[in-house]
Amino acid sequence: MSTKTIYLDRNENNYGPAPACFAVLKNADLSDLSWYDRSFTSGIKSILSARIARDTGVDESRVLLGYGAENILKQTVQCYLRKDAKLLVPAYSWWYYKLIASEVGGVSVEYPLTIGRDRFCYDLQGMMEVYRREKPAMVFVSTPNNPTGNALALPDLKRVLATFNDAIVVMDEAYAYHGTVDYIKDLVDALPNLLIVRTFSKYYALAGMRIGFAFMGANLTALSQYINRYLGYHRLSEEVALAALDSPEYYREITGYMTEDKEAYYAELGSIPGWRVFKSEANFILTEIPFRDKEPLQAFLKERGLILKFMNEPLLNSHIRITLGTREENRMVIDAIKAYYAGEHA
């Protein structure tokens, strides 16, 4: 079956960035490509870090930029985690966390998530018990968590962060709704060992431009020296990122579409016998399916040009993570899965 391939397996934003981002590229002053950035003459790292600082109220010196969020995560581990030191990570979390810990000889230890009727949840008491027992050097808190989609409410987040007072704590907010920034300054001001990491890849649909950013507490100045670029950053990428920040209406609109489509996934796929569809606060959903259907369903969807993330991990080996695509793409996925169960694969 010949058809266009639709990739819904890596949590990219298929709506694409705001039109203003394309306008920047179309009208770019290409002479900028020949010259290093000179923002340092104004006492800042870059025009983008200055804008992010202004939007959040965090001092510009505490805003970091990096080549995507995962690069900041990796450099943080390389800067602070020593051989045989412990890194706490969520159960059911991104495999990359354990990889970057192992690269420096660190030891990954999981803290628990619980599985409710229709969602995953952080086990707050379990998190704190593991922390006290293991005495880690570093803790990762992913909110929303990939691939489970669950997030920590702000009161719960403050509670666990107050407990992790002797470790460096990294909040991975790659999937956070970026219009919500009110709490960032309060957290990084109150918690000197805290790093909050975000990205333009997901919400702003700029994964290909590799723009990550972070906010650091007062005790993490070594990380600033480790990450900051002496000769500045990618000048054109920064202009595109600024255009995205200037387009809140566009991103609110597509977030609204995704929120509505999640409800369709919950209702329609959740009604299939043997399926569980977990509530998500990210741009993807996680489903659990009968194991016997895993390989034939994957082949059935692939024939129709639909590429989803069929999980193959010890705790998640009968699950599919489905990136939210456009409204048309989401409908295609739902209809194709329902067609499979209606017998069209026979």
Image: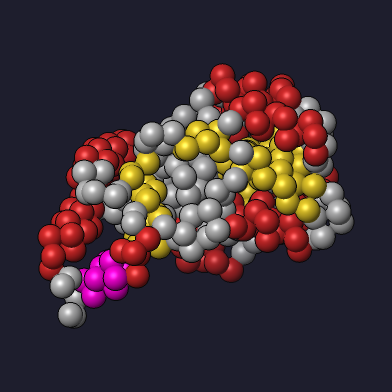
**Quadrant where the N terminus is found in the figure:** bottom left
Identify the residue at horizontal 80%, vertical 60% (top origin): 104
Chain part drawn in magenta: 296-306
The quarter of the displayed image where residue 111 is located: top right
Q: Is residue 329 above or below residue 141?
A: below
Q: Return the x and y of residue 95 as percentages of the image width and height.
A: 59, 57
Dominant SS in magenta: helix
Q: Return the x and y of residue 279 as percentages of the image width and height.
A: 37, 37
**Front-lying residue, 173 or 135:** 135
Q: Return the x and y of residue 234 as percentages of the image width and height.
A: 58, 59
Q: Return the x and y of residue 3 as percentages of the image width and height.
A: 19, 75
**Quadrant where the C terminus is found in the figure:** bottom left
Judge from the rendering whether residue 14 lies leftward or rightward of residue 213; answer left or right.
left
The quarter of the displayed image where residue 112 is located: top right
Looking at the image, can residue 166 be seen? yes
Q: Residue furthest right?
A: 83
Judge from the rendering whether residue 223 lies leftward or rightward of residue 181; answer left or right.
right
Identify the residue at horizontal 76%, vertical 63% (top origin): 103
**Front-lying residue, 147 or 295:** 295
